[in-house]
Amino acid sequence: MKKIAVLTSGGDAPGMNAAIRAVTRIANKKGLEVYGVMDGYQGLVEGRMKVLENQDVSEILSRGGTILGCARLPEFKQKEVQFKAIEQLYKRDIEGLIVIGGDGSYRGAYELSQLGFRCIGIPGTIDNDINGTDETIGFHTALNNIVDAVNKLRDTSSSHHRCFVIEVMGNNKDSLALYSSIACGSEFIITKNTGYDEDYIVKMMDYYERTQNKRHAIIIASEKIIDVEALAQRISKETGFSGRSIVLGHIQRGGSPVPEDRILASQMGQYAVDLLLDNLSGYCVCKRDNHIIGRPIIEALNDVNEIQDQMYQLFYEIV
């Protein structure tokens, strides 16, 4: 193997640049030429790539987002589109591809590997919603952004006798809501796994305010579960709290990646290059029990993450 390519796909995640940097520097050190693919699978199909040298990835370790850009391409599910992507790679004599992204990006890498092109996946998503790994690149930074925002909201909440209902990202998994609820000491967490009993929440908010003289309260909800503004309005009407809703939105994706994401991305980037050099394909890099390992993508996607259940149990025991 003489040439490989790397792309970032789906939503951006802090730490993706650290992974690009690690892939480039490790591959160059091992005598490989590295191509950076612009704008994910879209750029791959269109042939928008450039050679990456060590100086091209200098000083990107601390930058959020991704220097290669991200894009979503639903048409990549079509075989003819996948063949166009492979054709672009073969034009440049590229023999391996590293894909940094989430669940959809993994499936694209898996499909290319099924067509005979060597692909390795690296988990890059703030949602931490890939079952095969305990952690994904970007999750720690997004969690830190949420905790920082909630800490600021708690200050004003205490001053004005408020209950903040805060919506956080999470897509199909509850990790950001769950971990931030524990870290921030929220009164309630609302996710697809907890269910949603609005009457009970309002009743308990009223109880907390009347009998425990609470000056503030925090409720954290995962996105796409409830209307946070409607709940906040009902809390204002039926309890002694002044309800306020906040949708944190894309601020959770931004900012310089925290050290945990930089280190994880660097470890995974190195391991991905090693997997390609071992002639493996259709594999992804995972962190399991504090070890970096490689697993077949399809096996990892179908795995069950027991850490989620443990964290829910912790939340229920300490609230």
Image (cartoon, rainbow, N blue to C red):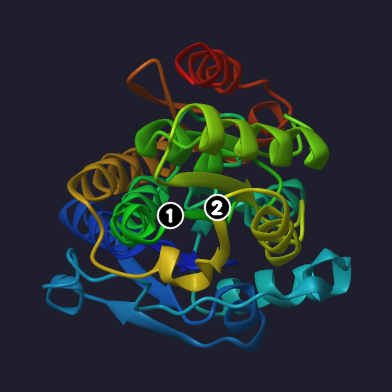
Picture residue at 53% right of the left edge, 81% below the top: 39
Instruction: Tell me the element at label 1.
Output: loop
Q: Measuring from the top left, give residue 182's x and y in whole percent.
A: 43, 30
Q: Is residue 314 left or right of residue 238?
A: left
Can residue 90 be seen here? The reply is: yes
Picture residue at 73% right of the left edge, 29% below the top: 194
Indicate which disc, 1 or 2, sits on the residue closer to the N terminus. Answer: 1
Return the residue nearer the eye: 283 or 14: 14
**225 over 298 or under it: above or below:** below
Q: Measuring from the top left, give residue 198's x and y in whole percent.
A: 79, 42
- Residue 237 image label: none
Q: Quadrant of residue 142?
A: bottom left
Instruction: Tell me the element at label 2.
Output: loop
Return the residue nearer the eye: 190 or 143: 190
Q: Quadrant of residue 58?
A: bottom left
Return the residue nearer the eye: 273 or 160: 160
**Amino acid type of the residue that numbered disc 1 sits on in the rendered structure:** His
Q: Quadrant of residue 183?
A: top left
**Amino acid type of the residue that numbered disc 2 sits on in the rendered structure:** Phe
- Residue 241 image label: 2
Within 10 Å of disc 1 (Cα), the crowding (few <14, some 14-19, many 20+) is some
Can residue 1 be seen here? The reply is: no
Q: Is residue 72 left or right of residue 284?
A: right
Q: Measuring from the top left, give residue 55's x and y in whole percent.
A: 12, 77
Q: Are marks 1 and 2 in contact (CB under 8 Å)?
A: yes
**254 over 203 or under it: above or below:** below
Picture residue at 74% right of the left edge, 30% below the top: 193
The residue at which mark 1 appears reads as 161
Picture residue at 25% right of the left edge, 47% below the top: 266
Within 10 Å of disc 2 (Cα), the crowding (few <14, some 14-19, many 20+) is many
**251 over 28 or under it: above or below:** below
Q: Measuring from the top left, give residue 57's x and y in whole percent.
A: 20, 72
